[in-house]
């Protein structure tokens, strides 16, 4: 009997490893069926058999849960490796897999938003067909991922910023970015990157005085010569548009 248990255990381990690296995932039901073989309790019927099965399987449930959680962690790590290498399509694929294990993790949705945004920029009309549906689909995915992240964590500053950038520079919906960035700046009051995007959104919505005020604030707060110069140039453009200066 000891030899039988050891053999089954080795088989389960091999199955788990092969399944993960072949990309077919790990099915907890399959693991449970193989564990049933190992424990020798396939179909308990009597009270005594049921009590014995419960006692044997109490630790098995923990084993399956732990294995699933570890698989999800590995998908997150793999996705981050692809992200570090700028391989956004592969990263997106594995963040999606990680979400299957951690569907309430706001960080995963944030990174899906980031990766989908990059993939939208790479979805060019290579055939000259005039069809930009792939780009639009990635943009919709990016938006929905940021929104889900904010649904899970309403004060998630990075998701607010990412979604605002999407609205201002990609979706031509800058009016939606304004409340997001105004809220963000109540949380992170010295975030000059968010101020730059918000000033742009104000400008696009003809709120010129607010845009000028923000550019002045950026100039006073920022320690970056490049950012100061950009704010000064943008302020000049706003003033010219508003007052013909």
Image: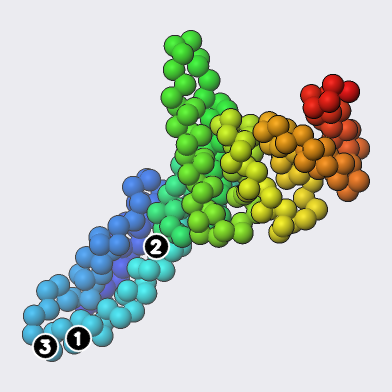
Residue 30 in view: yes
Marks 2 and 1 sit apart, C-alpha to C-alpha, by 25 Å
Q: Is residue 34 left or right of residue 25?
A: left
Circle 2 sits in a helix, a strand or a loop, which is it? helix
Q: Nearer the viewer, residue 132 or 47?
A: 132
Label 3, on which residue? 47
Mark 2 or mark 1: whose residue is earlier in sequence:
1
Label 3–label 2 contact, CB within 8 A: no
Residue 83 in sight from this viewpoint: no
Would residue 174 be found to the left or right of residue 32 on screen? right
**Residue at label 1?**
52
Identify the residue at the far top of this view: 128
Crowding near pointer 1: few (<14 within 10 Å), some, many (20+)? few
Foreground mark, 3 or 1, reads: 3
Asked whether, in this view, residue 190 is left or right of residue 30, the answer is: right
> Residue under circle 2?
68
Q: Residue furthest left?
A: 46
Q: Is residue 183 above or below residue 245?
A: below
Q: Residue at x 45, y 53 (%)?
A: 98
Residue 78 position, x and y percent, is 53, 49
Quarter of the image with the C terminus in it? top right
Looking at the picture, how far across and down is residue 191, in whole percent? 77, 50
Q: Nearer the viewer, residue 245 or 51?
A: 245
Q: Position of residue 26 (x, y in %)?
A: 34, 56
- Could you tell me which residue is drawn at 71 percent across and 41 percent down? 198
Cα gap from disc 3 to disc 1, whole angstroms: 9 Å
Label 3 – label 2 distance at C-alpha: 30 Å
Q: Residues within 10 Å of mark 2 (few under 14, many from 20)?
A: some
Q: Residue at x 52, y 40 (%)?
A: 142
Q: Nearer the viewer, residue 6 or 90?
A: 90
The local secondary structure at tag 1 comes to helix
- Disc nearer the start of the sequence (3/2): 3
């Amino acid at each position: 009997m000891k030899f039988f248990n050891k053999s089954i255990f080795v088989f389960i381990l091999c199955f788990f490893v092969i399944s993960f690296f072949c990309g077919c995932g790990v099915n907890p039901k399959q693991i449970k069926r193989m564990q049933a073989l190992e424990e020798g309790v396939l179909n308990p019927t009597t009270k005594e058999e049921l009590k014995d099965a419960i006692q044997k399987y109490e630790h098995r449930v923990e084993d399956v849960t732990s294995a699933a959680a570890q698989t999800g962690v590995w998908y997150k790590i793999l996705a981050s490796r692809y992200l570090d290498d700028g391989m956004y399509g592969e990263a997106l694929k594995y963040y999606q897999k990680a979400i299957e294990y951690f569907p309430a993790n706001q960080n995963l949705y944030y990174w899906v938003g980031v990766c989908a945004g990059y993939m939208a920029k790479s979805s060019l009309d290579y055939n000259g067909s005039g069809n930009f549906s792939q780009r639009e689909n990635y943009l919709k995915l990016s938006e929905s991922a940021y929104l889900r992240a904010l649904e899970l964590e309403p004060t998630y500053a990075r998701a607010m910023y990412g979604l605002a950038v999407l609205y201002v520079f990609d979706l031509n919906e800058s009016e939606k970015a304004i409340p997001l960035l105004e809220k963000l700046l109540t949380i992170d009051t010295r975030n000059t990157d968010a101020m730059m995007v918000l000033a742009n959104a104000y400008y696009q919505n003809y709120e010129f005085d607010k845009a000028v005020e923000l550019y002045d604030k950026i100039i006073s707060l920022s320690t970056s010569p490049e950012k100061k110069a950009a704010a000064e140039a943008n302020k000049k453009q706003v003033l010219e548009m508003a007052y013909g200066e």
